[in-house]
Image: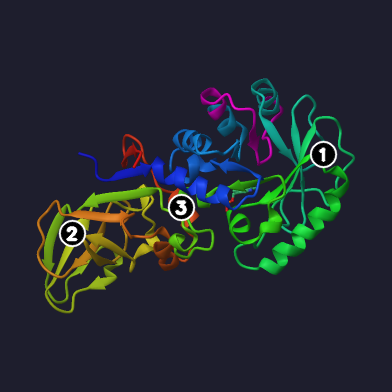
Amino acid sequence: MHRSEITVDLGALRRNVRTLLRLLDGAELWAVVKADGYGHGAVDAAGAALGAGATALCVATIPEGLALRDEYRIERILVLGPASSNREIVQAREAGLELAVADAEIPEGVRVHLKLDTGMGRYGYSEVPSPPAEVVGLMTHLASADSDPDFARAQLERFRTATQQFSHLTRHAANSAATLRLPESHFDAVRCGGAIYGLSPFNSDPTDDVLEPVLSWQSFVAQVKQLQPGQSTGYGRRFVAEEPTWIGIVPVGYADGFQRALTGTEVRVGGEPRPVVGTVSMDSFAVQLDRELPVGTPVVLLGHGMLAEAHARVAGTINYDLLSGIESGPLRARRTVIDA
Ligand SMILES: *Cc1c(COP(=O)(O)O)cnc(C)c1O
């Protein structure tokens, strides 16, 4: 028996893509499926997004792009991050990947998108170099579309001015947050990751933006015990019972992606929200119960109202970080794909 089950609902992903497309007024939607589709499974996520109207895929690395090229014959797979070797560039050329390029050397024989740094302060040119024939797109990336729209607008204005004379090239700037909040960011295409998975780019409730979480994660209570006053659970004795206290042990831990900083968050045990208590271990954590429950009682970690955004606030991080860290595979959670 698997210690936990991840369910990826491609129906929800398709609905999210359609919701985003309705905002676009003609711009294309490119699905960002880097980091194994933010932990959802890149191949499945890509197929569902393309089926719902996305017209291209974006990944972070050339190996990610090659893996998708084996599955999908679509025109455009754009690699957002830098190549790590010349060999990779050769592979990208042979596979017909497109590359985002941000430095002096523009590789030959590969379609490239020049990346402008308009304020992200990461990869990018400070102005558009005279574009050679290989250039098919101009792009920039926003630093604060989720938190400081004024700064994002200033970046967009810089991008618009710098790229004005190249309007025959595909221009793209928006991530999920900008797609949702800044219509002037849409240009010719938007690059949406988080939102297609139903993750709020604002780390707030995704339903506020009519987005549905795509991934749910369920486990069970593997052991139930009553702590007596003075007894504790877990490393460091960070939870000590003050009165007789029922706890359940859930066989999921930080090695599965249930981060160590999640002490205090709530999971749903037998239908009721219950707090995670004590230190999260590598392979298990404890929940406080209000009564004795049978071993095997289901525990919902994500989905069915348990929001990644709420967990992320407790852990001092963001939903993307939690989701891209969930481990599935033969030794960890079992992953099931549904279409609901
Ligand atoms: C990851 C990434 C995106 C997608 O951002 P979301 O907030 O997940 O939509 C878009 N553009 C670039 C360059 C990225 O690296």
Q: Left of 280 or right of it: where is 130?
A: right
SS class of the residue under badge 2? Answer: loop
- Which is in the foreground here, disc 1 or disc 2? 1
**Quadrant of the frame with the N terminus:** top left
Residue 116 drawn at (x, y percent): 78, 49
Label 3 CA crowd tier, 10 Å (few <14, some 14–19, many 20+): many
- Which is in the foreground here, disc 1 or disc 3? 1
- Give amino acid for label 2: Gly
Magenta stretch encompasses residue 324: no
| Residue 152, label in figure | none
**Quadrant of the frame with the C terminus:** top left
- Give amino acid for label 3: Gly
- Give the residues drawn in magenta, as a range: 68-87
The foreground one among 24 and 216 is: 24
What residue is disc 1 on?
168
| Residue 270, label in figure | 2
Q: Earlier in the sequence, mark 3 or mark 2?
A: 3
